[in-house]
Amino acid sequence: MDWELAYRTVLAVDIERSAGRGDPALLAIRAALRAVLRESFGRSRIDWAQCRIDDLGDGLRVTAPAGAPKASLVHPLFDEVAARLRAHNRLAGPPTTIRVRMALHAGDVRLGPDGEVAGRPLEVLARLLDAPAVRTELAEAPGAVAVLVLSEHFHEETVQPGLPGIEPEDYRQVAVHNKEFTSTAWLRTAAADAPAGPSAAPPAVPQAVPPPAAGASRMNNRATGHGVIYAVQNGVQHITTTPRN
């Protein structure tokens, strides 16, 4: 069998705590995840049909086609995935809620004549995805929908340059130890709700003029301007305006 050596970007996604939900729920969340990824790849302008998709049981591994821009798998892909997971979870019950770990790496892989993919980059990808530090990151962020881990190589080429839509300060470096694999990697967490921008102050609600207290005096003076001034004994004035005829 002839294998071709080629540089590719590889992505792995794993659904947190997929076991024990029962077959109907597992099938539902697997289908939902595939739909989320397919739509997110489309929004990132990467042809899903040209990707190699491998089933990981409770997740997927995606080998991007030649020439796919690596930065697009960081942004907008991760943000698109997170947005769709938020939308899914708002309507899902506990058995079909989805939270995921995502890992990204790139390197020279072996491509088989029937589309098979093998090689060291896939091993690195698997170690990153299952690293205790990455699992802990998601487990300790109950409000998060996704955690993204980038290999040092991937981070250097896609995040450090500070391309539009990618904020280097959103990532933090962690040490990764998983079996024989030891390295550094970079984490980013997507919260359950997208950060809200500055919002306008709510409109003031008109307050009713309180009735005068028992025994309080009240005066009604017509103003020379555009309204009527009402004053009660405690000295507070409530001014209302009426249009001029």
Image (cartoon, rainbow, N blue to C red):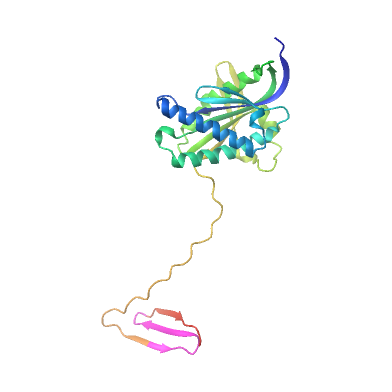
On the rendered image, what quadrant is the N terminus found in? Answer: top right
Q: Position of residue 81 (x, y in %)?
A: 56, 37
Q: Is 138 colored magenta in this rendering?
A: no
Above or below, 120 relative to 88: above
Asked if one can make out residue 75 in the rendered structure from this viewpoint, the answer is: no
Q: Residue furthest top?
A: 1
- Magenta part mainly helix, strand or loop? strand
Asked if one can make out residue 40 in the rendered structure from this viewpoint, the answer is: yes
Residue 97 falls in image quadrant: top left
| Magenta-colored span | 220-234
| Residue situated in front as seen by the camera: 104 or 69 | 69
What number of labels is visible? 0
Q: Is residue 201 left or right of residue 41?
A: left
Residue 46 falls in image quadrant: top right
Q: Is residue 215 left or right of residue 111?
A: left
Q: Is 229 colored magenta in this rendering?
A: yes
Q: Residue furthest left?
A: 214
Q: Position of residue 32 (x, y in %)?
A: 50, 33
| Residue situated in front as seen by the camera: 88 or 163 | 88
Residue depicted at 41% across the width and 80% down the height: 237
Above or below, 20 relative to 187: above
Q: Position of residue 34 (x, y in %)?
A: 55, 31
Residue depicted at 60% across the width and 39% down the height: 170
Q: Position of residue 160 (x, y in %)?
A: 69, 36
Above or below, 150 relative to 227: above
Residue depicted at 58% across the width and 15% down the height: 180
| Residue situated in front as seen by the camera: 234 or 162 | 162
| Residue situated in front as seen by the camera: 44 or 106 | 44
Residue 111 falls in image quadrant: top right
